[in-house]
Amino acid sequence: MSSEDGEAGQVREALLRAVDSGSLPQVEDVLPEPVHVGGPLREELLTRARRLARTGAEGVLRERTGLTGPAQRTREADGTGSFHERLTVGELALYDGQLAVLTALERHFRRPASFGELRDRALAHPDREHVVWAEVMLELEHRPADETWDAAVRLSTDPDPVARLFAADVLLSQVVEEIVRGDVLYSERAALLLPWARREPDAAVLEVLLNGLTWAGGPEPEKVGLAYAGHPEPGVRAWMPMLLDTDGHSLSPEGLAAVLTLAGDPDPEVRGRVCAWLEGYQGREPAIADALVVLSRDERQRTRIDAVAALAYRDDPRCVAAERHIGPLEPGLDAETLPLFAVMDHQRRMRERGDYPGGSIHPPAQE
């Protein structure tokens, strides 16, 4: 056997092991460019992936172990923002990304599945963070826009909220792809989500639609934002500021009142999202600066950091006293994050303007 035959055999074995694992990252780590994968091997990989996808991780484990007890499941991040479940039966473990592996191989070898097949794959793992759902979305991003959009719109009236969630996520991916391809600020397609957003009863679906509407220009998204500002679900309320800011640097009186209310929302996630948005908001309404002073004492350190940075970007001298509330950085927060340097930059700007008496490093602290 030649060295080339030996290398080809090693590649084949590595690919088959990766496909068998059910882990999409493992497959992507060893998958060469299509030109380096011969026709027989492509067919072998696709056939194997299809069979494993039909059987599923738990079925494969039972086939291989002969055991019938319940599988132990552990959620594991895959390093891309998605997750797999790791299933264990006896001493054998597999990941549950078989449908993601099949979808990736089909795209790699240009054997695309139909929209209906991809829909069914995503719905088999009804979680937007699951690797199968994410891989289906990635595949559909590259499909012809009109065809994919129309197929998703037909699902917008489906009685199953998970099917509508899938449809909304497809439309969101198309909106974002339009922005990326066209290098534009707003998406014409995003405005088409307005009628659906106004009637959607499911909070999870509505969150995705509101995300899409943040990419739409004009006054209509603000009206939707105001309508949902008091929604009972925190995830819905958290999208409101991005809908209320219609021109990037000012709020209507109604929008300002809504943002101030949300800045004091009882849910810490809503307050955090609002504060992160205020960090980049260019308006200089005094009431917003006062709200940021309050947020600088929030229970969440990430929110406190964003509030202090937002004050510093506004050159509000209260940022210096507010910075003292941040405290030692908690695990998981990046010490190099730019907002942590915002107060120092504010002080530099003030010194350059001569606004600190005697060139003092710290301005008078105000609360």
Image (cartoon, rainbow, N blue to C red):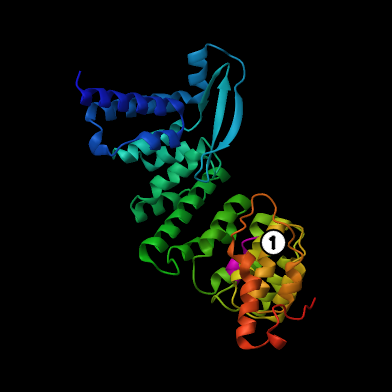
Name the residue tied to disc 1: 303
Q: Give residue 109's quadrant in the image.
A: top left
Q: Is residue 359 visible?
A: yes
Foreground pick, 160 / 93: 93
Residue 233 percent coordinates (x, y): 69, 54
Q: Is residue 47 left or right of residue 366?
A: left
Q: Is residue 147 left or right of residue 128?
A: left
Tag 1: Cα neighbours inside 10 Å, few (<14), some, or many (≥20)? Answer: many
Image quadrant in which you'd find residue 279: bottom right
**Does the magenta segment cover residue 239?**
yes
Quarter of the image for the N terminus: give it.
top left
The residue located at (39%, 36%) in the rendering is 29
Who is closer to the viewer here, 53 or 195?
A: 53
Q: Is residue 171 left or right of residue 108?
A: right
- Circle 1: residue type: Thr
**Residue at figure coordinates x 58%, y 73% from the top left:** 245
Q: Position of residue 335 (x, y in %)?
A: 62, 57
Whether residue 98 is situated above or below residue 211 in the rendered picture: above
View extreme (front): residue: 358
Q: Residue at x 59, y 70 (%)?
A: 280
